[in-house]
Image (cartoon, rainbow, N blue to C red):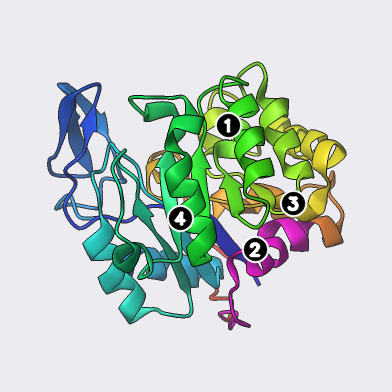
Amino acid sequence: MIIDAHAHLWNTQAGRVNGKPVIPLTGGKSDFGGELRQMMPPYMLDGRNTVEMLMANMDYARVSGCVITQEYIDGSQDSYLLECKEKYPDRMRITCLYEEKPIADEWMSRFDGVKICGGRLENQGLLAHEEVFAQAERLGKFIAIDMADGDAQTDAMEELIVRHPDLRIAVGHFGMVTVDGWEKQIALAKHKNVYIESGGITWLFHSEFYPYPSAVKAIRTAIDICGIDKLMWGSDYPRTMTAITYDMSKDFVEKTTELSEEEKRKFLGENAEKFYGFPELAVSDKIINMVE
């Protein structure tokens, strides 16, 4: 069973980058703060990144479950994600977006977790945002956080982890693995309720490209730091699909000889099943494609 711990969905993209709007265009493109960017694969024609498209990709790649995280550059997708979860209650875990203002208990309670874009916060001092950490702990939700590069926020995060020992925290983007100091983010997972997910790792090693030997090496380094039981796979769908297929985002892990079969099982699904509380999920039958 495989679980994707870092994917994105949106019905209408309405985010901001560096104070400028992100505007969806056609053919998977967006006006990204005044620059033209290929935000999604070109076959996503109308600017919508729908749950139906994701589920089709997951079924083909034999991915059983997913965790939907959020980003300021997409704008809050809270309402759309609630609709998606209603359609696929067992296969999805969803987050509400923290935007540096209080979230009502009633609203947060409708989600599985809270997404914090640590590197994009106006006030990047994480201790200033302790209220949302305490609230998530009290309500039994997890925190998904993409931290600022390197070790800029690791000391503050460690303090929050100590203050809130029952709070589940998933650190995204594999600690921004290509930036100096990334190992300090990975080391946070030495704490019992802190895990690391690899969403965006193929983006970070894009210049090397498939089969990403340096990404596999980084996974081995992380295993040495915090152990395999704390690491989870994520695709960063659909942005990384502008360069590779959804299946390729995990295929390089499945095919490497640098990880044992047990390590692959834990990294690709078993750890996420435990952390996010997924039920036992079905595994799709393999479909023979036209080039096989």
Q: Earlier in the sequence, mark 3 or mark 4?
A: 4
In this figure, which residue is indicated by the disc labeled 1?
Answer: 209
Instruction: Determine which of the numbered discs, if any, sits on residue 135 in the image.
Output: 4
Q: Earlier in the sequence, mark 2 or mark 3?
A: 3
How far apart, in angstroms, are the residues tagged by discs 2 and 3?
9 Å
How far apart, in angstroms, are the residues tagged by discs 1 and 3?
25 Å
The crowding category of the residue bearing disc 3, from other C-alpha atoms within 10 Å (few below 14, some 14 to 19, many at least 20), is many
In magenta segment, residue 283: yes
How far apart, in angstroms, are the residues tagged by discs 3 and 4?
23 Å
The residue under label 4 is which amino acid type? Gln
> Is label 2 in contact with label 1 (beta carbons under 8 Å)?
no
The crowding category of the residue bearing disc 2, from other C-alpha atoms within 10 Å (few below 14, some 14 to 19, many at least 20), is some
Coordinates of residue 290 in the picture (x, y in percent): 48, 67
Coordinates of residue 20 in the picture (x, y in percent): 16, 24
SS class of the residue under badge 1? Answer: loop
Labels 2, 1: front one: 2
Q: Magenta segment range? A: 264-284
SS class of the residue under badge 2? Answer: helix
Q: Give the quarter of the image for residue 240.
A: top left
Instruction: Determine which of the numbered discs, if any, sits on residue 230 in the image.
Output: 3
Q: Earlier in the sequence, mark 2 or mark 1?
A: 1
How far apart, in angstroms, are the residues tagged by discs 2 and 1?
29 Å
Give the residue displayed 76% in from the left and 46% down from the top.
Answer: 191
Coordinates of residue 109 in the picture (x, y in percent): 38, 69
The residue under label 1 is which amino acid type? Phe
Instruction: Determine which of the numbered discs, if any, sits on residue 234 in the image.
Output: none
SS class of the residue under badge 4? Answer: helix
Labels 3, 4: front one: 4
For the stretch drawn in magenta, the main secondary structure is helix
